[in-house]
Image (cartoon, coloured by chain):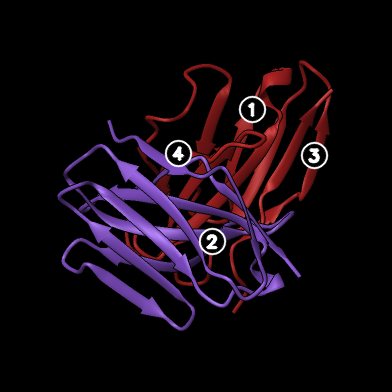
Amino acid sequence: NAGVMQNPRHLVRRRGQEARLRCSPMKGHSHVYWYRQLPEEGLKFMVYLQKENIIDESGMPKERFSAEFPKEGPSILRIQQVVRGDSAAYFCASSPEGSAYGYTFGSGTRLTVV
Amino acid sequence: GENVEQHPSTLSVQEGDSAVIKCTYSDSASNYFPWYKQELGKGPQLIIDIRSNVGEKKDQRIAVTLNKTAKHFSLHITETQPEDSAVYFCAASRAGAQKLVFGQGTRLTINP
């Protein structure tokens, strides 16, 4: 039973380009959460999704960031027109229920904007 | 909103000694307090959690204590081993909430 799968593990983008981060939840999990971790800091909540629905995007920057979790396929976190300040590790977690209990995190995508 | 403060930011102990990491939280409605271990290049891994209806929970060398009145909780690692070296994060969540609020992390180093 594979865990939460994130890809790519590392992503380098030039300023102004788009970044697409993918997350496949654990089998049987239909709730996905995205967190961002800046260097030497804790994780900050960005967005919570269920299949085809955004439930809570209170932590998502209003511009350039979007997330989806389609009926088929992985959840996608999309960052348009990336800037240096977007450089961070982005972690996805999944859970069988819509609660913070028993999150399982993926290994993350490390985004570097040059 | 919830705010979680974690101390110390770095901690170095001799192998075999105990390590204690402390967190305080601001939201009295929080009732779920997990601890995560993050090794270099990996995602956070849940190591122990506690809910507000208990004051202490233990799992082998790891224990967590919770003081709801004072709004603080602590991670205790006994008989530390080199593989305990990692960054540890505390977090808090309200009942029924889907998101966690994390502390800033503690880099624990176990010296042989």
Disc 2 chain ID: A
Cα distance in 3D space between marks 1 and 4 = 16 Å
Quadrant location of residue A31?
bottom left
| Residue beneath the point at 30% across and 42% down | B25
Q: Give the residue number, with chain letter if any, for mark 1.
A: A79
Q: Secondary structure at mark 1?
A: strand
A22 or A42, which is in the foreground? A42
Q: Colour of chain A?
A: red
Seen in the picture, residue B57 relative to A108 is either above or below; the reply is below
Amino acid found under the numbered disc labelled 4 = Phe
Q: Give the residue number, with chain letter if any, for mark 2.
A: A25
Q: Are marks 1 and 4 on the same chain?
A: yes
Q: Give the residue number, with chain letter if any, for mark 4.
A: A45
Label 1 packing within 10 angstroms: few (<14), some (14-19), many (20+):
many
Quadrant location, the N terminus of chain B: top left
Amino acid found under the numbered disc labelled 3 = Leu
Chain coloured purple? B
Q: Secondary structure at mark 3?
A: strand
Disc 1 chain ID: A
Cα distance in 3D space between marks 1 and 2 = 20 Å
Q: Secondary structure at mark 4?
A: strand
Viewer-side label of 4, 3: 4
Viewer-side label of 2, 4: 4
Cα distance in 3D space between marks 2 and 3 = 20 Å
Disc 4 chain ID: A
Tell me residue B104's x, y (percent).
51, 40
Tell me residue B47's x, y (percent).
49, 69
Mark drawn on residue B39: none
Q: Are marks 1 and 3 in contact (CB under 8 Å)?
A: no
